[in-house]
Image (tube, helix red, strand yellow):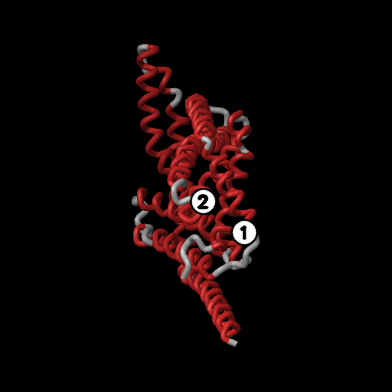
Amino acid sequence: MKTRTDASILDFGADNLLRNLGALQQEYEGVRQGKDIETIHRMRVASRRLRTGIPLFGPGLAPKKFEGWNQNVRELTKALGAARDCDVQIDHLQQFYLQLPIGPARPGVRRLLLRLRQRRQKLQRAVEKALADLVKSDVLMEMQRKLNPILKGIENLPRSAPLYALACTAVREKLEQFLYYEPFIQDPEDKDDLHAMRIAAKHLRYTLEIFSPLYADELKLFLKALRQTQELLGEIHDCDVWMIYLPEFKERERIRTLRYYGSEGPFRRLVPGLDAYFADRTTTRDRLYVEFLEKWQSWRQEGLWDQLINQVSTTYLPAVQAQLESVVDGVAQESA
């Protein structure tokens, strides 16, 4: 079996990295301006896909450079993630506020929105710095200079057995990491492992997306399940974050009010809204957790994850057989 310097792997990998690099660069100006929250979401996704692809294809494409590429992209992903998370919080809280009747709950939610918007302004400065640092590092242009000649020199090669082997190995590895957390999902209070499972689902999903061109439409069912897993566990984690944050926020606002006014009186008008949102996050988490368990049990009954292994394995084996037959035919022709 050839290594990751196999020409088909280099072709496939260069194409994947350049497409995600282009998707990231396309959002640069929109993210810098900070006016549309979807631009930062799209750039974050592109950066995550790059971070999934670079360790897979970098050792063959740029063995001396790929670790530095990954580190630079990771710094950007980190800044984008904090800003995106804050955008999601603000967006959800705004929807919650609009559904509240005019009454005592609104002042507390308005105060929470004010603080989140103030935080988002600070995070925007961090995003702009991360963008500037990435441009200054020249890593994006360096990737293009390295990858474009490779792709132009060997593009449109037939898919080789080593490429299918890489896909099979990568998917198996990420699936194993994902399923490691299965024993912990029965405990609704195991927040850390539920969160870690969401991250593992994300890594498996991005790996499947990278190699999906090898499998036509055969991975759609698995990708749909992983998106649902990521969304449900992500929303559960968001609730967990709120349930930790809100009591701390209440205490900070109480102290701030006491210092400013010399009395807690003005703070008390904030309590109904903050308590209402805490209650909403608690009941929502309970509902999402039950929904996730039901989904998981149905996937297990269907043997979904076993089907995934079978899919990537049975597609890989014919590719190996075809390559062996090609070698045998070539030897036979030389001997004739």
Q: Residue at x 41, y 43 (%)?
A: 240
314 or 326: which is nearer to us?
Answer: 326
Q: Residue at x 57, y 41 (%)?
A: 43
Q: Position of residue 35 (x, y in %)?
A: 62, 30
Q: Residue at x 58, y 78 (%)?
A: 326
Q: Which mark is in front, 1 or 2? A: 1
51 or 39: which is nearer to us?
Answer: 51
Disc 1 from disc 2: Cα separation: 38 Å
Q: Which residue is mark 2?
A: 231
**Image vertical order of residue 16 relative to residue 35, above or below:** below
Q: Position of residue 188 (x, y in %)?
A: 37, 53
Q: Secondary structure at mark 2?
A: helix
Q: Which residue is mark 1?
A: 154
For label 2, count other residues whose C-alpha is less than 10 Å away and answer few (under 14), some (14-19) or many (20+): some
**Image vertical order of residue 299 relative to residue 275, above or below:** below
Q: Secondary structure at mark 1?
A: helix
Residue kind at label 2, given as amino acid type? Glu
For label 1, count other residues whose C-alpha is less than 10 Å away and answer few (under 14), some (14-19) or many (20+): some
- Examine the rendering and report whether any part of residue 248 can be seen: yes
On screen, residue 323 versus residue 249, left or right, reads right
Quadrant assignment, res 23 = top right
